[in-house]
Image (cartoon, helix red, strand yellow):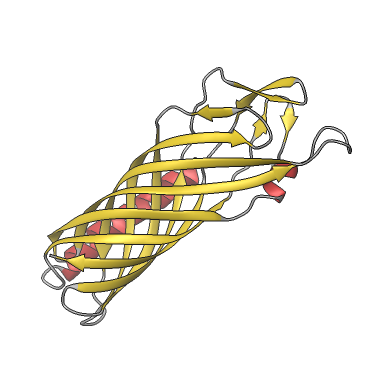
Amino acid sequence: MRIKWILIALVVSAVVVLTHRAAGAGPLGSYAELKGGIYSPSATFDFGNLDLQTTFDGDTKTGVAGEIAIGHYFLPTLALELGLGYFKGTGSYAGQTPADPRRQVDFNVIPLILSAKAFIPVGPQVAPYGEAGIGAYFTKFNVTDNLNTFNGSTTFGLHAGAGLNVDVSPSVFLGLEGRYVWANPSFGDQKINLNDTEYALNGFELNGFTTTLALGYRF
């Protein structure tokens, strides 16, 4: 937890310092972006007394990620961006006995996020940036070959990242963005039934990286 707040503080500090130094350069107005890429979960979790730290996390697959965002430049090097996205993680784990089939675990997430972005104009068409922000995350969790599907409560989380925008024309740009998300959804008293035994959903986190390519338009 301490490391998370240190990273957020560093990004926010960079926003203030870089905006002050580079004020007067860069675009103004608003923009829209379409982003697509991958989500790589980094956290482990367990079902009650069924420890999945090695089986689930070891078999976790990288999932898809996407986002539609709209932003506004309040300064030439400082923008606020609102995004609505989607990302998915998939994994599998072995049953309680060698005869049990492997189960597939999917979690689907719809985030609504607000980000502050500090841009560093390093040339007429290239602008790297750092970002930090907050988000609301709605999570659906399910296990295939099983009737268990769970809807988590809306969870608020944090994120920080960095990216690079390259202008193709005065109004069109391409981007590459990497972001780390911290969020811990709650599933209340819902329980999952595995091999005729019920387990609580405990310790589930959305922590992980999203890496996306972007197509943007300034207006």
Of residues 145 and 141, the one nearer the viewer is 145
State the residue in front, 21 or 212.
212
Position of residue 102 relative to residue 170, above or below, is above
- Residue 68 lies, in percent from the top left, at 30, 54
* Quarter occupied by the C terminus: bottom left
| Residue at position x 63%, y 27% in the image | 147
Q: Which residue is at 59% across, 31% downward?
A: 203
Q: Determine if residue 54 is in view.
A: no
Residue lying farthest to the right in this orientation:
98
Find residue 78 and report its horizontal and vertical position in percent: 20, 60
* Residue pictured at 54% horizontal, 54% vertical: 63
The answer to whether one can see residue 196 in this image is yes
Q: For this view, does 44 lie left or right of residue 216?
A: right
Looking at the image, residue 211 lies above or below residue 169: above
Q: In this picture, is 95 found above or below 60?
A: above
Question: How far from the left and from the top, in percent, is residue 102?
Answer: 77, 41
Determine whether, in the image, residue 55 is placed left or right of residue 190. right
Residue 30, image x, y percentages: 14, 60
Question: Going by the image, does 145 lie left or right of 32?
Answer: right
Q: Residue furthest top?
A: 189
Mark count: 0
Q: Residue furthest bottom?
A: 124
Q: Is residue 71 left or right of residue 4?
A: left
Residue name at image x 46 percent, y 39 percent: 183
Q: Nearer the viewer, residue 210 or 172?
A: 172
User: Residue 192: which quarter of the image?
Assistant: top right
